[in-house]
Amino acid sequence: VRFVKLRDLSGITLSWLDMDDIYGICGKGFYPLLNTIAYDLNFNINKQSFGQNIDSLSDLKEKSSKKVLFCSVSSNAETYYGSRRFTLDKIKLDLCIYLLIDYNNSLLLTSKSIYSQFKIILTINLNDFLIIDQLINNLKNKQFYGFNINLKIFSNDIIEKVKIIRSKLPNKYLLTISFQIQPNKYFNLIQLN
């Protein structure tokens, strides 16, 4: 959180949440990690109001200014706790606004009601720009809002490829970029700004 604030980044992805992080079995109330991060990111929460905790997204919206909450679902999230089937409708509606999910994740097909519940952002790799037209055509009947480019390595042609992707997207689609890099590599990204 300190790094995000120092570098004025837009947010943090929590790469693992277990049931305690959601239901607060530890005795700290619902969403203990989310509450802690919201407080540390100064979502306009003073100590008095924060003492009541955030129990829903609407609470967080009231106490935040320009932050947006994303849920990210990985490709290996089809089962949890060993055997129980996971579908996207098991994500609590008040937990996030946007849902980032790999464009080829089978959960998109098995979770039929999800499109009316979340704003879907399809995650692609930088080299997937060649199939964007195909994805838009295949998903035109689905309610999705844009694409997230998942960058796992830093390369010098990032700007070129991002421009190609943006040029293929109608203006109504959101385009986001997430980086999976170590903080000490972040300074390479400053040059992209």
Image (cartoon, rainbow, N blue to C red):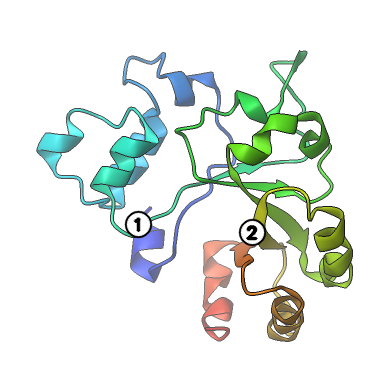
| Image height of 15 relative to 132, above or below | above
The residue lying at 68 percent from left, 49 percent from top is 143
Q: Give the residue type at disc 1.
A: Arg
Q: Secondary structure at mark 2?
A: loop
105 to the left or right of 65 = right
Q: Where does label 2 land, which residue? A: 180
Q: CA distance from mark 1 to mark 2?
A: 17 Å
Residue 46: x and y, percent? 14, 44
Query: Earlier along the polypeptide chain: callout 1 or callout 2?
Result: 1
Instruction: Rate crowding at label 1 as few (under 14), some (14 to 19) or many (20 or more) other CA atoms within 10 Å.
Output: few
Residue 115 visible (yes or no): yes
Q: Give the residue type at disc 2.
A: Gln
Name the foreground residue: 87 vs 125. 87
Name the foreground residue: 60 vs 189. 60
| Image height of 9 relative to 88, above or below | below
Q: Residue furthest left?
A: 48
The residue lying at 68 percent from left, 52 percent from top is 144
Q: Where does label 1 land, which residue? A: 2
Q: Secondary structure at mark 1?
A: helix
Residue 193: x and y, percent? 52, 83
Name the foreground residue: 109 vs 2. 109
The residue lying at 89 percent from left, 63 percent from top is 134
The residue lying at 38 percent from left, 68 percent from top is 8
